[in-house]
Image: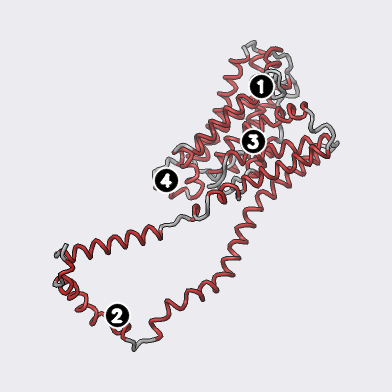
Amino acid sequence: MTAATRAQTRASHGAAERSGDEARTYAAYHRPWWFRTFISAEFLIIALLVLVWIIATTSVDNFSGPLTVRYLLMDIAPLMMIALPMTLVIITGQIDLSVASTMGLSTVVVGILHVQMGLSIPLSGLLAILVGVLCGVFNGFLVAYVKLPSLAVTIGTLALYRGIAVGLLGTTALTDFDQGWSDLATSSIGESRIPAIMIPVVILILIFAVLLHFTPFGRGLYDIGHNEQAARFSGVNVARSQMTTFILTGAVSAAAGIFYTLRFGNSRGDNATGLELEVIAAVLLGGVLIFGGRGAIHGVLAGALLIGVLSSALRLEGVTVNVINIIIGLLLVISVLTPTLVAGAQRLRERLSGPAAGQDSAPPTSEPPESPDSPAQQNSTPHKTAPHHESAPADSASTPTATP
């Protein structure tokens, strides 16, 4: 190979690399960062939360008082806690409907161990969390390893765990809890109106945010949600990841049940009934796709706060709990329908713009066939171009400018 040939080869390779870099585009990053950050489902919910907060502050009596913020945060603390692991479950394309039943079972376990058996609150709480972990293991095993649909599995365990909780206590309510622990559960941080329960809630938020957004485990959950087979082929342990998300959901649900028991000072089998609706609504309102593969922690927190603000404002206006549940149910339906409608509108727009785009790109591709007798067309035939390309290096090598 002559020097001219090597130079020509290097030049052609360089041009190919440059053209490759120019053509390398990623659909998720083809817009500027500010567009990707602020024009998103998560920031839409944050903006809606701010709007609802302003309307409630200006139009609902006593909403802007310090006690409202205190009780608002205490009400939504279990919701925010359970929504964090539920986000991981839904991002993988699964769902856990048994979280409220696990929470109710946890309150019963704490009540029996502390009130009837005399164990301390820390030991009772630890055993209750262990029961929640076992609930998560059972759900995760059936979903991840037996490959049963999570919807059917957790509907069954919803009834199973609730039935066990009600069966253990019946209609009895255990109320003789240690007053010091109850006061701690309802205490505030210093002289502020912020409840102390927000400290473990913030710690959980940081843990799950790091776990989801800054670890290979979290990236694997997104991969599973996008395509389970592709995630498996790329090295993600799908079954173990799904199992872990269900265990986290069971453990955090049990922890939320301990707080619920100490806050209200009672242990009943029907505690937290229906909470799974609010948890799933908060997660989906926060921008998590019900089919998996998309979602973020800050959007879920905004969704939980939005449900809490709406519920608090409506209660202050004298709206009944049944009406509030109807509104939350409508929000849940809207949050599921919206991504589907947006995707359908995008497909319709692409279908309508497809012929126009094809017409725009038609001239360059159809130009050569329109002039079959032209010299360019004749030179493009194999029996004429082959000798030309074979003689080109020899001709260029004979020129003095080709030497390095």
Q: Secondary structure at mark 3?
A: helix
Closer to us: mark 2 or mark 3? Answer: 2
Q: Amino acid at mark 4?
A: Arg
Q: Tell me the quadrant of the picture where the N terminus can be found.
A: bottom left
Quick check: 403 above or below 272?
A: below
Q: Are marks 2 and 3 in contact (CB under 8 Å)?
A: no
Alpha-carbon span between mark 4 and mark 1: 42 Å
Mark carried by residue 232: 4
Rendering quarter of residue 384: bottom left
The structure's colour scheme is secondary structure
Quick check: 174 above or below 211?
A: above
Quick check: 101 above or below 127?
A: below
Q: Secondary structure at mark 1?
A: loop
Closer to us: mark 4 or mark 3? Answer: 4
| Crowd band around label 4 with a 10 angstrom C-alpha radius: few (<14), some (14–19), many (20+) | some
Q: Residue at x 68, y 19 (%)?
A: 185
Q: Amino acid at mark 2?
A: Ser
Q: Secondary structure at mark 2?
A: loop
Q: Amino acid at mark 1?
A: Ala
Q: Could you tell which of marks 4 and 3 lies nearer the N-terminus? A: 3
Q: Is residue 240 visible?
A: no
Mark 1 sits on what residue?
A: 196
